[in-house]
Image (cartoon, helix red, strand yellow):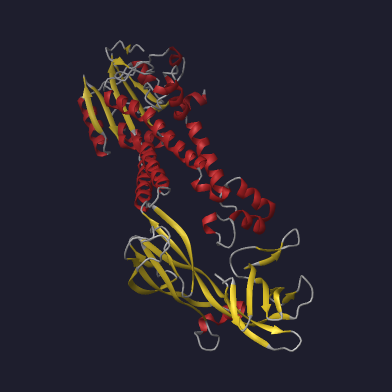
Amino acid sequence: MNEVKCECGHVNPHGTILCESCGRVLEEKEKEKQLLDMRYEGSARRSQTYNKTIIDKVWNFFSSVKVGVWLIVITLVASSLGTIFPQEMYIPPLMPPGQYYEEQYGWLGKLYYELGFHNLYSSWWYLLLIASIGVSLVICSLDRVIPLHRALNKQRVSRHESYLKRQRLYSVSESALTDDAVGKIKQKLSAKRYKLREENGDILAEKNRFSRWGPYVNHVGLIIFLIGGMLRFVPGMYVDEILWLREGETKAIPGTDGQYYLKNNAFIFEVYDKEKDDEVFQDAINKVGTVVKNYQTDATLYKRAGEIVPGEKPELEEIRDQSIQVNKPLKVDGFALYQVDYKLNEMSKMSFNLENKETGEQFGGVTLDLYEPDMEYDLGNGYRVEVMSYFPDFEFNADGEPATKSRIPNNPAFIFKMFTPDKPEGEVSFVAIRQNIEPLGDNDYKMTFNGVETKNVTALTVRKDLTLWIIGLGGLIFMIGVIQGAYWNHRRLWIRKIDNQIWTAAHTNKNWHGLKRELEMVFADTGIKAPEDQLVEEKKD
């Protein structure tokens, strides 16, 4: 594209509306307007100039403020959808996610899972939306800030007559510009922190130009904020997972790649006693019955001593013992483990006796680990019991057959096959809590319940966030931009002597009333008229 040379001699980029140097109107359409559009100083913006190549079209698409707003709206709507039900990372690991959402929330939960909203914030399309907002912010900023900066830096003191008289604040005085008047005006402007420039007897007073960059500082802060948010999906940068740990159990801490392990030595649950504790809790106890005083996990932290060998338990080195309480996390190597939930008295073992139904004689007992039961138990003397099926969380499915809702032993049930000397082929018995069914006919033997052992289970949130400082920095820069653009405004005053008249014109990016009052004080007692608001005068007419 050919560059545009103004009558003043300044060469402007193609697409410039107002000459960057003298302010003369270069486009015919702009000449028809009453007042000049000073939003970007009439500078040439790439999105308004080029529209031929694919790069131009992509640039123009993302440089549109409307597109940016729609991207933000779509992202906000999508984000709100992700809060309707808990994300998968926050649901208890009791069963497959699809089954959990359907059972807990019905058909709507099933639809929620099938549409992928259960892992919304790590989905490819959500990340693409975030990236698109970032691209839009970058292109919008470059499309505007570079030409604006160039136009403001190249502006001359003496501006063209058409530029001055088409400013919103403008007036003409027939008075002479005396040295005394000039001195008073300069003194008052300097007192109000204006920077003065003079050229051929003309004056340009300007202050708070930095406020024009406030929106672009906002954009920089938002871009950094979005980068920090997207870095959370980079492995090792952000961890937020739940670790369920039974008493006596040792597990690898999520996100540590098997470097650190935690053992739950004991879970402590304490409530306030109505008679023993402070009266301050009496009202709460009377209302709800139970008020939690403390719940904590007494844990031991281990570090893996060697390499992981498939099929073998890792060798662990004890680091320290620590009690984990609410707001008192265990911290190690950037990770923090917080106490967030618990489950009291989860069944861990069940005991049964093999008994003759007619005589009541017992021939030995079996104790089943409800997490990893053995499949066969030898009681001696030709008596043995085989576990044909195990249902940790028993229910009958749609076909009326026994099934399990989850791997957690909330309602354990077994199908036993009992072998005795007089029944070498065995007898089958279905045993659940308060149920003893003989599906193949009457048996001579049965498995009788003999007791249960329970364990407390603790839930710890494992968190690591290496992006927090990036997000915080982005938020700080964004707030600086908000303050920069909200509490200051860019103000300019032009004073030019043309023939025997004094022309004054002024412009601000906002708060026109404040600028008008300020200039009235500046021009008071100088014999020169302060610029008047042409927009107000036009409305009166």
**Residue 245 vertical placement versus 174 (above, below):** below
State left or right for residue 23 relative to residue 135: left
- Give the percent coordinates (x, y) of residue 94: 58, 63
Residue in the image at 47% along x and 27% along y:
61
Q: Quadrant of residue 35?
A: top left
State left or right for residue 166 relative to residue 525: right
405 or 152, nearer to the observer: 405
Q: Quadrant of residue 192?
A: top left
**Residue 271 vertical placement versus 430 (above, below):** below
Residue in the image at 59% along x and 73% along y:
376
- The quarter of the rendered structure image containing the N terminus is top left
In the current view of this chain or complex, which residue is farthest to the right? 441
- Give the percent coordinates (x, y) of residue 63: 44, 29
Q: How many labels were placed on the picture?
A: 0
Examine the rendering and report whether any part of residue 28 can be seen.
yes
Residue in the image at 75% along x and 58% along y:
399
Q: Quadrant of residue 181?
A: top left
State left or right for residue 467 relative to residue 380: left
- Give the percent coordinates (x, y) of residue 419: 67, 77
Residue in the image at 69% along x and 52% along y:
107
- Give the percent coordinates (x, y) of residue 468: 37, 53
Examine the rendering and report whether any part of residue 534 can be seen.
no
**Residue 215 vertical placement versus 40 (above, below):** below
